[in-house]
Structures are given as C-alpha cells and as structure tokens.
Image (tube, rainbow, N blue to C red):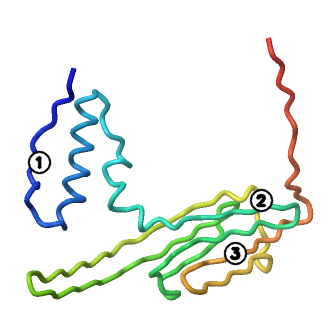
Amino acid sequence: MPRQTLPSLFSDASPFLHPFSKEMAQIFDQFRRGTAPEAGDLASGFDTALVPSLDIAESDEELEISAEMPGVKDEDLDVSVNGEMLVIKGEKSSDREEKEKEYHLVERRYGSFRRQIPLGFVPEAEAVKADFSNGVLKLKIQRPANTKAGVQKITVKSS
C-alpha cells in the first residue's frame, strides 16, 4: 500500500521554516505508525546544542573528563563535587544577525544546562584539577588511595 503523506504547510515558505516543517512531518509520521514520539524527540532539534558532549577516560589512578561547551564563558560555568557526583552547570547565549537585500534575520539562543556524572568515589578537594580553554573543560580527578578501578570478570554460561 503506498504511503500517504499530508501536504506540507510550508512547501513554498522561506528556508528558515524548512527545519521546523521537517520536524513536524517526522512527528506526524510517528503518530501514523502508532508510535508516539519520545519527549527527547520533540525537543531534539532545540535543546541538544545546550547539553555538553563528554569524553571520559578512566584509569586506576584518575578520571579524565573533557566537556565541549562552545559559546560558554568561564564566568558562566560552575563545576562542583557533591559527594560522589560531579556536577557541571552553565549558561550559553548566542546572538546572530544577518541583513540581506530580501530579508533581515535575528536569532538569539539562551539556555542553561546541567550534567551530573557519578564518580563512584568521593575525591579529596585538592585532587580535582580543572582547565577551561577554547570552549573545552578538562578535568583530572585523582582517585583516593583506598579505591581501585578494577574490573571484575563475570563468567557467562550457555544453557
């Protein structure tokens, strides 16, 4: 059976509405298939730029965490440890303006983010080093002497 599609409300609209139109079409497709969109799907085009990407490397001695935060100023960044939880909070803002013969575009994007990373141990205050440069936060967190990042192998049996 051929797939039926709804006519696009924005087919002749400006290119600025195309991403919105595409997102709405995907949502309608999900409803037609009988699967409701997840909350993250609805906001995927809007909030993902606010959530920093993380790289985490672990060794017996330390954790190394890199978080990409382009557009964040160091005064808008807050890093703390709450027990065994590393908390990274911040605010982003960006303004963009384009003036052309046929149009005038002004975009402003503001928002805050918060990432919590479970460490599995409580680090000592002097054991956490942080550097923020060119939109990248790099953290080195020394493990306490009484903890190990050991891996326990689990034997899996077939039946």
The residue mark sitting in front, 1 or 2, is 1
The residue mark sitting in front, 3 or 2, is 3
Q: Provide residue 153's location: percent of width, then percent of height.
A: 87, 37
Q: Which mark is residue 37?
A: none
For the point 79% across and 80% down, the residue is: 126
CA separation in Å, label 3 and label 1: 47 Å
Left or right, 118 with respect to 155, comes to left
**Circle 1: element type:** loop
Lower sequence index among marks 3 and 2 = 2
- Location of residue 112 (image quadrant): bottom left
The residue labelled by disc 2 is: 121
**Circle 3: element type:** strand
Q: Provide residue 33's location: percent of width, then percent of height.
A: 28, 28
Q: Is residue 70 above or below residue 83?
A: below
Lower sequence index among marks 3 and 1 = 1
For the point 88% across and 61% down, the residue is: 60
CA separation in Å, label 3 and label 2: 15 Å
Kindly identify the amino acid type of the residue bearing the numbered disc 1.
Ser
- Number of numbered discs visible in the structure rendering: 3
Direction front: furthest residue: 2
Tell me if mark 3 has few (under 14), some (14-19) or many (20+) residues whose alpha carbon lies within 10 angstroms of its own: some
The residue closer to the viewer here, 99 or 121, is 99
The residue closer to the viewer here, 88 or 5, is 5
Q: Which mark is residue 8?
A: 1
**Circle 2: element type:** loop
For the point 59% across and 75% down, the residue is: 79
The residue labelled by disc 3 is: 139
Lower sequence index among marks 1 and 2 = 1
Tell me if mark 1 has few (under 14), some (14-19) or many (20+) residues whose alpha carbon lies within 10 angstroms of its own: few
Quadrant location, the N terminus: top left
Direction top: furthest residue: 159
Quadrant location, the C terminus: top right
